Image (spheres, rainbow, N blue to C red):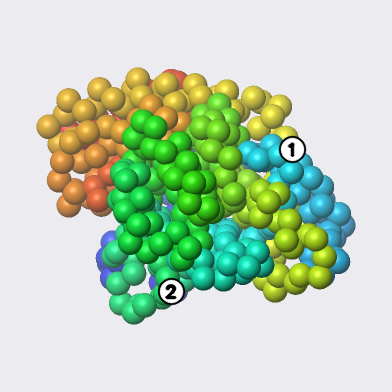
Amino acid sequence: MSGSLWHGFADMGAVQRDGAFVVSRGEGAYIWDDAGKRYLDATAGLWFTNVGHGRTEIADAVAQQLSTMAHFSNFGDFAPETTVALADKLATIAPVPGSKIFFTSGGSDSVDTAAKLARRYWNEVGRPAKRIVVGRQKAYHGMHVAGTALAGIPVNREGYGELMPDTRTVEWDNAKSLLELIEREGADSIAAFFCEPIIGAGGIYLPPEGYLAEVREICREHEILFVVDEVVTGFGRIGGSWFASTRFDLQPDMVTTAKGLTSGYVPMGAVFIAPRISEPFFSGGVWWRHGYTYGGHAGAAAAALANLAIMERENLLAESARLERSLHDHLAPLADHPRVQEVRSGLGAVAAVQLADPAEALPFVKALREHGISGRAAGVGAMQFSPSFVMTDEQVAEMAAGVRAALG
C-alpha cells in the first residue's frame, strides 16, 4: 500500500500505523477489498451510490461522451449539448416548477454557490444589507469556506480562524430558535436559512414533526431565502420522491444537490433555483460572475442522464421507500442492546444506530468489517446506514445481523 495518499477526515498517523481499508471493486450492494473479501456496503460509498455498484451502463455512457466531446465550457454562451439535455431533464423533476439549474463539481461547490447567490439576489433587488446566512447545530454543508462556516459542527472549524463573516447558527430542532435570531438580528439583515431535511454527517437526525414546514413558513413571513441542502437526500434518498423538498412540499428558493445525481460514478453537483430568484439575472444586463471549470462537465452529464434513466426504469424511488420500512424493521430492535443508546430510522433510506459510548464508534467500524459489513461513523458516536436502493430486504437483514454480531 502506498503511503502517499492523504485521506480526508482522517488521523493520518493512525492510518499509516494500521493501514488503509482499500476497496478494489463493487457490484450491486457489495464491495470487495484488495484481499478479495466481500462486504455489504451499508453506506452506499459516502451516501451516493443510489443505483448500486458496477453499473456498466453509466460507464458506457461516459465513455461514449468522452470519445465524442469530453467537455468544453458553459461560461458565457457556451454549452455542451449533453449538459443542456441534463438541465432540461432536471427541470422536469425540480421541486419548484420553472427552476433553473446551475451546475457545480460537487456538494461543497453547490453550497458555496447558493450562499453567494443568496447574497447577490438581495443585492440585485435593492436590499444589499441582507447578508447573514444561517445554519443549524449539527448540520454539515460541505468543506468549502462558506459551508464550513455555515455548518453546525464546531470541530470542523477548529484551527482556521474566522472563515466567513455574517454566518449564524440556531438550534437544529427548534423553529423558535430561528425566530429568536430574527428578532435579535433583524430580518432586513438575514439573506438565507440553510436546512438539511435530515441531518446527515452530523449524526443522522430526523426532523421533529412539523419542523420543516414551520421553518419554511418563518422564512416566508420574514422574507428570508429558504435553501434546502439535499446533497444527501436528493435523488431518492428520502424515500418515494426525488427530493425531500417535494415529499414535504417545502417550495424551496434553492436546493443544493450532488451525490445521487450521478450515484457517485463521476463528480457532479447542481443547484436548483426557483423562478423568483433567477428572474433578476435572466431579465437582461446582469452578469453573475460565478462558475466552475468543470461545472456541468459533459462526461458527468452523460453519467447523470444514464443514472436517472436507471432510477426511472427500475422504479428505484419506490425501492427507496421500501428500504425506509426495511431499515426501520431490522435496525430498530437493536435499540435493546446495552451498547446502543437509540436507533434513528423511519424516514428515507437512511438510519443511525447511536452507540451508548461515543468513544467506541471508530473501533466499531472495524468490528463491523470482521462481520462482512462496511460501515461508517457519523456525528458523535452514531453508525450511519444509507444503502444503495438496490439492497434487498434480505441484505438489510444480513446487515442488521452483522451489526448485532459486532455489538457482541
Binning the other alpha carbons within 10 Å of mark 2 as few (below 14), some (14 to 19) or many (20 upward) gives few
Name the residue located 49 percent from the left edge and 46 percent from the top edge.
221
Report the residue marked by disc 1.
92
Who is closer to the viewer here, 106 or 217? 217
Who is closer to the viewer here, 140 or 323? 140
Residue 408 appears at what percent x and percent y? 17, 33
386 lies left or right of 171: right
Who is closer to the viewer here, 109 or 397? 109
Residue 182 appears at what percent x and percent y? 38, 57
Name the residue located 34 percent from the left edge and 79 percent from the top edge.
161
Q: Is residue 49 visible?
A: no
Who is closer to the viewer here, 249 or 80? 249
The amino acid marked with disc number 2 is: Met
Residue 129 appears at what percent x and percent y? 51, 70
Name the residue located 60 percent from the left edge and 64 percent from the top edge.
122
Which sits earlier in the primary sequence, circle 2 or circle 1? Answer: 1
CB-based contact (under 8 Å), mark 2 and mark 1? no
State the CA–CA distance, disc 2 to disc 1.
35 Å
Report the residue marked by disc 2.
164
